Amino acid sequence: GAGVSQSPRYKVAKRGQDVALRCDPISGHVSLFWYQQALGQGPEFLTYFQNEAQLDKSGLPSDRFFAERPEGSVSTLKIQRTQQEDSAVYLCASSSDWTYEQYFGPGTRLTVT
Amino acid sequence: EDQVTQSPEALRLQEGESSSLNCSYTVSGLRGLFWYRQDPGKGPEFLFTLYSAGEEKEKERLKATLTKKESFLHITAPKPEDSATYLCAVLDTGRRALTFGSGTRLQVQP
């Protein structure tokens, strides 16, 4: 079956611009996660949804970061007024409700110039 | 606070030269330990979940083991296509988010 998909795969933004990153999880997966991965590092948790409810947003680095999943399927991560330190790969993962394994998408590489 | 430390940071092997990657962890309560493989420009690919000390899982040339403080990923007779970054992550009993280590970059030369 289809895996997790993310779009766009690459995004270049000028400092101060707003960006929106999309994640389409595996069909039927109730849990959705966003992670940020800096070059040469492991992914770091940003936020977690169960269906449409955002149950944990403790990893969001500032109030410029906002995520939503209004219908419990597709999710969008929005970054307002982008800064150079926001440059990273943003990974989305999904999980079913009977297992803890998370399945990752290919990521969106964000470069802020 | 959960912590995961992977060693070595990088490893270069000759084809057929077996070795092990280490993952040391600290959690308040372990719900599971996960191994992922990540190729350049791609997202992490799930390999194994280990739930309790003494557990072992195998897949082709890879075998993962777990103790109360660390996990090992053993690679037997590696091939060049095994070259990738291997990530270890833990899931704490109080959370749903994974805590990752920085990974081990494995290069297998023909």
Image (cartoon, rainbow, N blue to C red):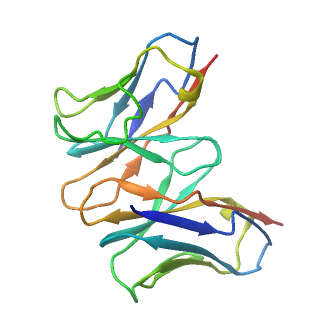
User: Where's residue A26, x and y in %?
Assistant: 30, 43
Residue at position x 70%, y 73% in the image: B78
- Near-viewer residue (A4 or A61): A61
User: How far across and down, in percent of the image, does residue A45 sit?
Assistant: 40, 46
Dividing the picture into quarters, in which one does residue A25 lie?
top left
Compared to A95, does A64 lie above or below?
above
Q: Residue at x 16, y 34 (%)?
A: A52
Instruction: Work out whether A109 lies above or below B39.
Output: above
Q: Tell me residue A79's x, y (percent).
A: 41, 21
> Image check: B36 left or right of B68?
right
Question: Count of labels shown?
Answer: 0
Please, which residue is most extreme toward the bottom here? B54
* Residue sitting at x 39%, y 85%: B55
Residue B103 vertical position relative to residue A63 in the rendered view, above or below? below
Q: Position of residue A22 (x, y in %)?
A: 38, 26
Query: What residue is rendered at 29% in x and 72% in y?
Result: B29
Q: Is residue A34 left or right of residue A28?
A: right
Image quarter of the C terminus of chain A? top right
Q: Is residue B34 left or right of residue A12?
A: left
